[in-house]
Amino acid sequence: MNTSTSQALFEKAQQYIPGGVNSPVRAFRAVGGTPIFIKSAKGPYVYDEDGNEYIELINSWGPMILGHAHELIQKAVSDAIQHSFSFGAPTRREVEVAELIVEMVPSIEKVRMVNSGTEATMSAIRVARGFTGRDKIIKFEGCYHGHGDSFLIAAGSGAATFGTPDSPGVTKGVANDTLTAPFNDLEAVRQLIDSNKNKVAALILEPVVGNMGCVLPAEGFLEGLRKICNEEGIVLILDEVMTGFRLAKGGAQERFGIKPDLTTLGKIIGGGMPVGAYGGRADIMNWVSPAGPVYQAGTLSGNPIATAAGLTMLNYLNDHPGVYTQLEESGKKLADGFRASLQKLSLNYTLNQIGSMYTLFFTNQQVTDFPSAKSSDLVLFGKYFHAMLNKGIYLGPSQFESMFLSTALTDKHLDMVIQANEESLKEVLNLH
Ligand SMILES: *Cc1c(COP(=O)(O)O)cnc(C)c1O
């Protein structure tokens, strides 16, 4: 495969951009080699600058749940840009999108739009701190909540990939206010809270983790956290930036029947534009400025172009329950195919899958938390990643990522992925 244009662009990019990329994992450092530069995408396919075609299993890290360049969203954006790009003043669509989010995610009574998932999580813990008058938060090892200072403690994905769970530039004071527990470990949470009585403002987690690879909550884990938070007056924040509008119309909270106090959203909510949101109980959200004293603002928040894309996306998902039926079937077909290949090749690797999210971990251990995810053979994953890329399958360039299926992937595409997976496994393990 010729990727010389991408290589030349990356060469030049490194001269002007730190590491050549605007977000670390894109640089392929976890898998070796140089990143491909994307020129365009349509439906289930992305095309690089050298004209190679790939089947998409990343989908912009989730937002492209309907496949790339969906016609309705394209039209909504091109209609919106006729009326200018930003006003910094209230607009009709902001009301419509807020109403729709409240309808789709039942735990949300009021919602504030921001410009990224990072902003959503930063703001959610600020309002939780204001509301409770407490300073500390609890997060889980391997969960990623964006790059806010408070969260760069034992954070998954990018941080895990680069072995810098504690980033320089995060002050000790901030780090001291972030307590961490192993995912799926209720007892550890209880102990943390006991030794920090009346000091914990919020507990934040990805209800299904995507950022140490796909990791599911154990039976009773989410319910247990809900109960502890009720008993201790702690604000339970579900970070559904990845799972929101993906694992169900109302996100993982609908799927698992858990009612958080606050929810953070991003990715799908913008239909591919930079959008995030946080929302939840009205009595907590009424602490947000200008209704209340907790300050949070944004020049471009709720801007008309992003809102046009997001509103169209959410309306489509709300009106087409078949999207979720299809994604469930696609996820199951892919998982069945992968498991059949693993069995055929006598391999014991762990496949975690739920709905349209999955990760194949190169470890024989069950993956239920960050240490078990880290037991994976990362060198082998790197080889597998490149074998798949060479067969025209575009995966997330790290073992610690979830893949995201879209409705643009038909049975034909899924069969191609299943076959490429089996061939790639054989290739990297020298099985014949
Ligand atoms: C992607 C992600 C974020 C950060 O969102 P950005 O838009 O990249 O700032 C936060 N939380 C979770 C669970 C995510 O997957």
Image (tube, rainbow, N blue to C red):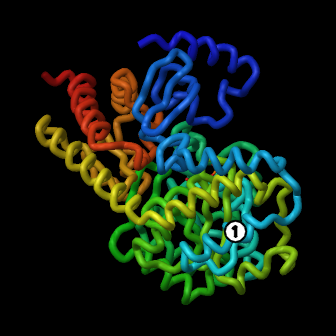
Tell me if 100 is positioned left or right of 301 in this view.
Answer: left
Q: Position of residue 161 (x, y in %)?
A: 52, 38
**Neighbours of disc 1 within 10 Å: few (<14), some (14-19), many (20+):** many
At x 84%, y 51%, the residue is: 86
Q: Where is residue 321 in the image (x, y as percent from the top left)?
A: 41, 66
Tell me if 278 is positioned left or right of 390 in this view.
Answer: right
409, 185: nearer the viewer: 409
- Quadrant housing the N terminus: top left
Q: Which of the 4 quarters of the picture holds residue 121?
A: bottom right
| Residue 118 in view, yes or no | no
- Quadrant housing the C terminus: top left
Q: Where is residue 136 in the image (x, y as percent from the top left)?
A: 68, 71
Tell me if 230 is positioned left or right of 335 in this view.
Answer: right
Q: Which of the 4 quarters of the picture holds residue 108?
A: bottom right
**Which residue position is annotated with label 1?**
124
Q: In this view, does 110 lie above or below 392?
A: below
Tell me if 339 is positioned left or right of 2 in this view.
Answer: left
Q: In this view, does 428 lie above or below 163?
A: above
Q: Is mark 1 on a helix, strand or loop?
A: helix
At x 60%, y 57%, the residue is: 312
At x 55%, y 69%, the residue is: 238
114, 159: nearer the viewer: 114
Q: Position of residue 182 (x, y in %)?
A: 46, 62
- Looking at the rendered structure, the kind of residue marked 1 is Ala
27, 80: nearer the viewer: 80
166, 132: nearer the viewer: 132
At x 71%, y 86%, the residue is: 283
| Residue 221 in view, yes or no | yes
Q: How many marks?
A: 1
